[in-house]
Image (cartoon, rainbow, N blue to C red):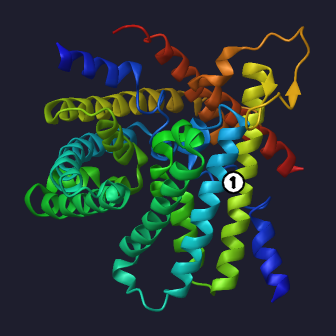
């Protein structure tokens, strides 16, 4: 049991890491990764929704009629997204403003619905939570990595939660604003995907 | 004049795919062939305009009137999901030609964040009903324009020799970045 739990958890970190291996849920990936901080915030919010939606759906999997299951899943997911939205508005208001409409849009993030349909609807609660947590942490890591690439190249620094930058390029480095703009997001993600393919193919 | 500005801004400057990053899954998923790209673009224009109108009415006369705006996320996704289902049944019965043309793309639109995103943007910008209608239409046209342009480029890429790790999605994303760069030059037009 512990072994299979560990297996479901770790597969989200490399073998099925979203959005690289499963090319799903690209919109928040591209939109909020201007900085590492936004990426982590979005990742944590999505992880919360993934874990609890997976848990509830797996508990209710024998009750929900299969014909209307997608509608039921969406309502469950939307409920948890609303919880996240209200909590973030109350406690992390600045981050809430920066992420903007991408918080309510977690509802239509295909990763969340995908895990509900592909995993939680067929497995028990403990495994589903492990799966949600693994995929969620994998998603957070990806967002943070992409955010780091874009922030370093686009701004030359990494700043997390105010205060002094935790990382700074030397004075000779001239940041190119292209990376924090929209096109930079596409190009950076495309090249990171290529690097993942290169490592994976060996 | 105001509507014209909203329209131009929606299609070019705030292009929903390339500047706002909404609806990227179908953007990459359905752009491998021109035919599927046109089908998806049509389906989005159809559903987005209707969803824009209905969510505006729901938001103004139900959520704001009853002071339950925190239910916005849940109610919008339900409106969109049932709208898609309804449109599907209606088209199947009355306009079978269009239904066959749209095919699989219609049910997929429920999880297209461009639809939900555009509706939320309309509300957050506090548009009037007509402005919301124009802006929904312009977002949908912008989506279609970017998707069809991208599909054209991608069909051409299929003929080119691409290094193995860059193939498929990876080169697609880089191409999308270059197209987004051209759309950036529309900034400052209005």
Q: Secondary structure at mark 1?
A: helix
Q: Residue at x 62, y 63 (%)?
A: A48
Q: Position of residue A180 (x, y in %)?
A: 65, 24
Q: Splitting the image into 4 quarters, where does residue A128 fall?
A: bottom right
Residue A169 showing in the rendered view: yes
Residue B72, placed above or below residue A121:
above
Q: Residue at x 41, y 28 (%)?
A: B146
Q: Residue at x 86, y 12 (%)?
A: A173
Residue B35, placed above or below residue B99:
above
Which quarter of the rendered picture does the N terminus of chain B lie within?
A: top left
Query: What residue did someone put label 1 on?
Result: A139
Q: Decide which of A51, A9 is in the foreground and name it.
A: A51
Q: Decide which of A80, B95 is in the foreground and name it.
A: A80
Q: Residues within 10 Å of mark 1 (few under 14, many from 20)?
A: many
Q: Is residue A176 left or right of residue B178?
A: right
Q: Decide which of A58, A18 is in the foreground and name it.
A: A58
Residue A11, placed above or below residue A58:
above
Number of numbered discs present?
1
Q: Residue at x 17, y 53 (%)?
A: B65
Which quarter of the rendered picture does the C terminus of chain B lie within?
A: top left
Q: Is residue B177 left or right of residue A159?
A: left
Q: Decide which of A84, B74 is in the foreground and name it.
A: A84
Q: Splitting the image into 4 quarters, where does residue B172 fall?
A: top right
Q: Position of residue A190 (x, y in %)?
A: 68, 35
């Amino acid at each position: 049991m512990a072994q299979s739990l560990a297996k479901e958890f770790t597969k989200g970190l490399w073998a099925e890491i979203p959005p690289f291996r499963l090319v799903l849920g690209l919109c928040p990936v591209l939109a909020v990764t201007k900085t590492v901080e936004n990426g982590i915030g979005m990742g944590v919010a999505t992880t919360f929704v993934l874990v609890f939606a997976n848990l509830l759906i797996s508990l209710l999997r024998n009750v929900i009629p299969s014909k209307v299951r997608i509608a039921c899943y969406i309502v469950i997911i939307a409920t948890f997204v609303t919880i996240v939205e209200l909590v973030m508005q109350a406690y992390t208001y600045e981050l809430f403003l920066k992420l903007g409409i991408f918080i309510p849009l977690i509802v239509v993030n295909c990763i969340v619905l995908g895990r509900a349909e592909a995993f939680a609807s067929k497995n028990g609660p403990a495994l589903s939570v492990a799966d949600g947590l693994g995929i969620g942490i994998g998603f957070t890591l990806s967002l943070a990595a992409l955010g780091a690439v874009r922030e370093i190249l686009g701004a030359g620094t990494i700043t997390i939660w105010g205060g002094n930058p935790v990382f700074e390029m030397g004075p000779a480095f001239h940041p190119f604003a292209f990376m924090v703009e929209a096109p930079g997001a596409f190009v950076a993600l495309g090249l990171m995907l290529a690097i993942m393919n290169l490592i994976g193919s060996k | 004049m105001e509507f014209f500005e909203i329209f131009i801004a929606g299609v070019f400057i705030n292009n929903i795919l390339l500047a706002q990053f909404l609806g990227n899954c179908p953007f990459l998923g359905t752009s491998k062939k021109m035919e599927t790209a046109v089908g998806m673009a049509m389906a989005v224009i159809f559903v987005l305009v209707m969803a824009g109108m209905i969510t505006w009415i729901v938001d103004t006369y139900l959520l704001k009137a009853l002071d339950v705006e925190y239910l916005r996320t849940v109610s919008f996704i339900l409106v969109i999901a049932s709208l898609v289902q309804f449109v599907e049944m209606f088209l199947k019965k009355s306009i079978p030609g269009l239904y066959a043309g749209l095919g699989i793309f219609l049910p997929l639109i429920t999880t297209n964040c461009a639809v939900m995103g555009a509706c939320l943007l309309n509300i957050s910008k506090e548009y009037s009903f007509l402005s919301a209608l124009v802006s929904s239409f312009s977002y949908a046209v912008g989506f279609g324009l970017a998707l069809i342009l991208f599909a054209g480029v991608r069909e051409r890429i299929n003929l080119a020799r691409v290094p193995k790790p860059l193939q498929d999605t990876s080169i697609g994303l880089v191409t999308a970045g270059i197209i987004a760069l051209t759309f950036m030059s529309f900034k400052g037009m209005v």
